[in-house]
Image (spheres, rainbow, N blue to C red):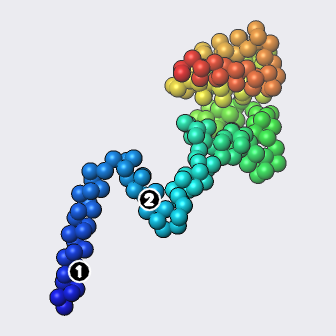
């Protein structure tokens, strides 16, 4: 290495150390001012302010993931899922659920949940049918209990809820779904 290169390296190292100390002591405002000066020297105009303005249009201000998703896509996550489901299946999730509920019996539903059916399960279904609930509504009731009850299908609870549904005149799948959604909404609001 020649003397000039060694001297240049030493000068460069010392300059970097001084800059490092200078930068460490600088405040954010001083740092931004220095950057703006540098940009003025390079281009004759302030680049950072322009860049900030461009980025400001892209900044997502939502505080929750749902709000950010809605700000970006112009719809809620649920609406987006509904659109995706409809595009894939050719029907809404409501229509699909109603079709599933109407196409299976409560006994089939128990098979899906437990893989085996006990005599108590059959007796429960017969009791619910004797109360006046049809198979479609029984299926909605069973799936509601599975979702709400964290300990499983409790027969006395299901029978009591079936009696309540009869009192409230919830005898169609549509009414049952509306009731379940309202109850779920109340539950979510009370837990928050």
* Side of 19 where 28 appears, left or right: right
The label number, if any, that marks residue 8 in the structure image: 1
Q: Nearer the viewer, residue 186 or 58?
A: 58
Q: Position of residue 146 (x, y in %)?
A: 60, 28
Q: Residue at x 23, y 57 (%)?
A: 21
Quadrant housing residue 71: top right
Q: Position of residue 33 (x, y in %)?
A: 42, 52
Q: Please determine whether, in this image, residue 59 is positioned above or below residue 66.
A: below
Q: Position of residue 177 (x, y in %)?
A: 75, 26
Q: Residue at x 70, y 11 (%)?
A: 164
Cα–Cα gap, marks 2 and 1 = 26 Å
Q: Determine if residue 125 is in view.
A: no
Q: Please determine whether, in this image, residue 139 is positioned above or below residue 61.
A: above
Q: Residue at x 37, y 50 (%)?
A: 30
* Side of 46 where 80 appears, left or right: right
Quadrant assignment for the C terminus: top right
Please give the residue where the numbered disc 2 appears in the rendered image: 37
- Tag 1, which secondary structure? helix
Q: Please determine whether, in this image, residue 73 is positioned above or below residue 142.
A: below
* Side of 45 where 11 appears, left or right: left
* Side of 93 where 184 appears, left or right: left
Q: Determine if residue 18 is in view.
A: yes
């Amino acid at each position: 290495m020649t003397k000039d290169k060694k001297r240049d390296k030493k000068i460069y190292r010392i300059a970097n150390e001084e800059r490092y100390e200078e930068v460490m002591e600088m405040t954010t405002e001083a740092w931004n001012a220095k950057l703006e000066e540098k940009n003025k020297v390079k281009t004759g105009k302030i680049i950072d302010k322009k860049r900030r303005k461009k980025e400001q249009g892209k900044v997502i201000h939502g505080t929750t993931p749902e709000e950010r998703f809605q700000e970006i896509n112009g719809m809620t996550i649920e609406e987006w899922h509904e659109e995706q489901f409809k595009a894939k299946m050719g029907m809404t999730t409501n229509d699909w659920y109603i079709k599933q509920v109407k196409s299976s019996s409560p006994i089939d539903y128990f098979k899906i949940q437990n893989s085996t059916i006990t005599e108590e399960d059959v007796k429960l279904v017969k009791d619910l049918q004797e109360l006046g609930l049809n198979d479609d509504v029984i299926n909605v009731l069973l799936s509601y209990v599975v979702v709400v009850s964290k300990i499983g299908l409790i027969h006395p609870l299901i029978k009591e809820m079936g009696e309540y549904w009869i009192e409230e005149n919830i005898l169609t799948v549509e009414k049952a779904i509306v009731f379940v959604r309202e109850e779920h909404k109340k539950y979510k609001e009370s837990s928050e």
